[in-house]
Amino acid sequence: MRLQGKTALVTGSTRGIGLGIARAFAREGAAVVVTARSGKDCQAVAEEIGKEGRRAIAIPADLSKSEEVRRLARDAESALGGRVDILVNNAGQPRVAPSVELPEADYRYTLDLNLNAYFLLSQETGRGMLSRRSGAIVNVSSVNGTLAFPQRLAYCVAKAGVNMLTKVLAIEWAGQGVRVNAIAPGYVATEMVKGLAAKGILDQERLSRRTPMGRLGLPEEVAEAAVFLASDAATFITGSVLTVDGGWMAYGYL
Ligand SMILES: NC(=O)c1ccc[n+]([C@@H]2O[C@H](COP(=O)([O-])OP(=O)(O)OC[C@H]3O[C@@H](n4cnc5c(N)ncnc54)[C@H](OP(=O)(O)O)[C@@H]3O)[C@@H](O)[C@H]2O)c1
């Protein structure tokens, strides 16, 4: 029970990595706000966690819209008894297109969801954390925050921004009890990846071969890193970007 008594807001927690994190946090004793656009999905996950005897509250929001991001922060805080101890910024999605054709609306949407929402939620929940001199933020970035992939311009820019957002907040808040870290996953077998594979945009076989461990990651493996960074096992860790990628970033051969 590494998060016993803590309260957590986990964005994008109805599927994939976010769902893995919400389940792991609840299992470790945290009360969790489950959020995504689909209210039905949020409710289903909250009920699933509730059946395990843990506490979860469903609060739907579209995080590409700043007013909804701020509303989520307020509602989550009240639902969790006035304090968000842990924020996991996870909701994110790429838009894949040649840069020369990427519509401005898609560029802006990608930055709003993958970067600007991370900033706004950190700011909104960070105020309470700073006043209590206690809190942890975990930002789900990507290997794309460091490595350039073609046709993912806005996504790569956003994730590089997330890495720097993490570091600046970390050093500003380090003396005030609030830690800010990021996780950079490699390819993880989630609905997002399966959806891109179904459209022929990704090839899961090739991705597995490119990964030194020879397979895609599991949401649960990313969730373990999130539990660690959010917990008291990581009290001297802030400003880090932890790679969880089966060796992808380390590999530089053919
Ligand atoms: N999977 C990978 O290989 C991989 C690799 C590196 C990094 N990542 C990062 O990991 C994070 C999660 O990825 P994933 O693969 O788990 O994604 P996923 O399976 O597509 O799940 C995305 C989650 O975010 C929610 N979401 C999407 N758009 C939203 C919006 N506008 N407002 C609020 N919630 C929204 C979705 O629910 P609704 O659709 O109902 O809103 C869902 O709960 C992302 O930040 C992604 O960039 C993933």
Image (cartoon, grey):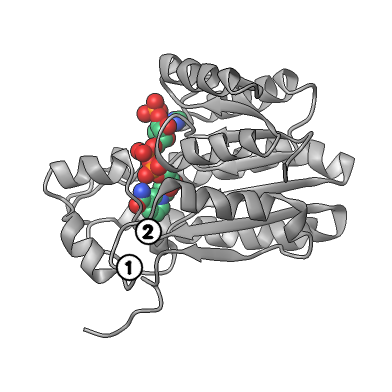
Q: Is residue 57 left or right of residue 207?
A: right
Q: Is residue 112 left or right of residue 23?
A: left
The disc labelled 2 sits on which kind of residue?
Answer: Cys
The disc labelled 1 sits on which kind of residue?
Answer: Ala
Q: Distance between the residues labelled 1 and 2?
A: 7 Å
Farthest left residue in view = 200
Q: Is residue 20 left or right of residue 8?
A: left
Q: Find out whether the residues at labels 1 and 2 contact each other: C-beta distance under 8 Å.
A: yes
For label 2, being within 8 Å of ligand 1 is answered no
**Residue 157 falls in image quadrant:** bottom left
Farthest bottom residue in view = 253
The dot on residue 124 is none
**Residue 1 falls in image quadrant:** top right
Q: Name the residue under label 1.
A: 148
The residue at 23%/62% (across/down) is: 207
**Residue 212 falls in image quadrant:** bottom left
Q: Is residue 132 above or below residue 47?
A: below
| Secondary structure category for the residue under label 1 | loop
Q: Is residue 179 above or below residue 22?
A: below
Say if residue 109 shows up in the picture. Answer: no
Q: Name the residue under label 2.
A: 156
- Give ligand 1's quarter of the image: top left
Residue 171 image offset from top left, x and y in percent: 74, 63
Residue 37 image offset from top left, x and y in percent: 43, 23
Residue 216 image offset from top left, x and y in percent: 32, 57
Q: Which residue occupies the foreground of this view, 246 or 95?
A: 246
